[in-house]
Image (cartoon, rainbow, N blue to C red):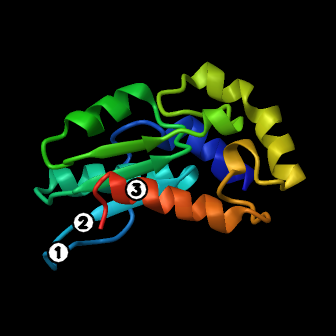
Amino acid sequence: MFIDALRAGLTIRYEDNDEWTIGSGMNNASQQFNLIGYSYGSLLAAHTANFYAKQGHVVDHLVLIGAPIDIDFLKTLRTRKNIKRVVVVDLKDKGDPIYAGITQWELTKTASTLGEQMKRQRGEGHFYYAHVVADSPARWAALARHLYDEGLR
């Protein structure tokens, strides 16, 4: 996990790293193509959406939850013609020090806070949706309602 976090913080949070794209091709048309990612997965989803959009495919919704994505890459995604909607779910109100558009310096400073939140496994901060706690089903249901309200089907 530490290696993935380091790799995410140093490389894949920026645009033009197609090495991290999920999937090898999209052949079937669908009514709605949505990509959702959380934390490290948000960076993979961002690269995948960017890759497919540049290939001419339409991405209806790109959802980035707790995304340590670079601000310039985020701006590119928001202005890419074939990505119809970028939904950012930051967890700052839950105590997450990571947010979409975070600078490299700020991201580096979060390491000890993230380590503590992960070690405690209380479903707090950056790990609000990741660790299973007593009210996780309610949290997940609220997130699903939010994404439904954003147009995901």
- The quadrant in which residue 96 appears is top right
Which amino acid, by three-letter code, is at mark 1?
Ser
Q: In the rendering, at what x and y percent does residue 139 appear?
A: 62, 58
**Image quadrant containing the C terminus:** bottom left
- CA neighbours of label 1 inside 10 A, class few (<14), some (14 to 19), many (20+): few
Q: In front of the other: label 2 or label 3?
A: 3
Q: In the rendering, at what x and y percent does residue 140 appear?
A: 58, 63
Q: Residue at x 36, y 33 (%)?
A: 73
In space, the residues marked 1 and 2 are separated at their CA atoms by 6 Å
Is residue 101 shown left or right of residue 95?
left
- The quadrant in which residue 132 appears is bottom right
Say which residue label 3 marks.
Answer: 147
Nearest to N terminus: mark 3 or mark 1:
1
Say which residue label 2 marks.
Answer: 33
Q: Residue at x 68, y 44 (%)?
A: 126
Q: In the rendering, at what x and y percent does residue 81 appear?
A: 13, 42
Which amino acid, by three-letter code, is at mark 2?
Phe
- The quadrant in which residue 116 appears is top right
**Image quadrant containing the N terminus:** bottom right
In space, the residues marked 2 and 3 are separated at their CA atoms by 14 Å
> Is residue 44 among what the camera can see?
yes
Say which residue label 1 marks.
Answer: 30
Q: Residue at x 65, y 68 (%)?
A: 137
Which amino acid, by three-letter code, is at mark 3?
Leu
Q: Secondary structure at mark 2?
A: loop
- The disc at residue 88 is none
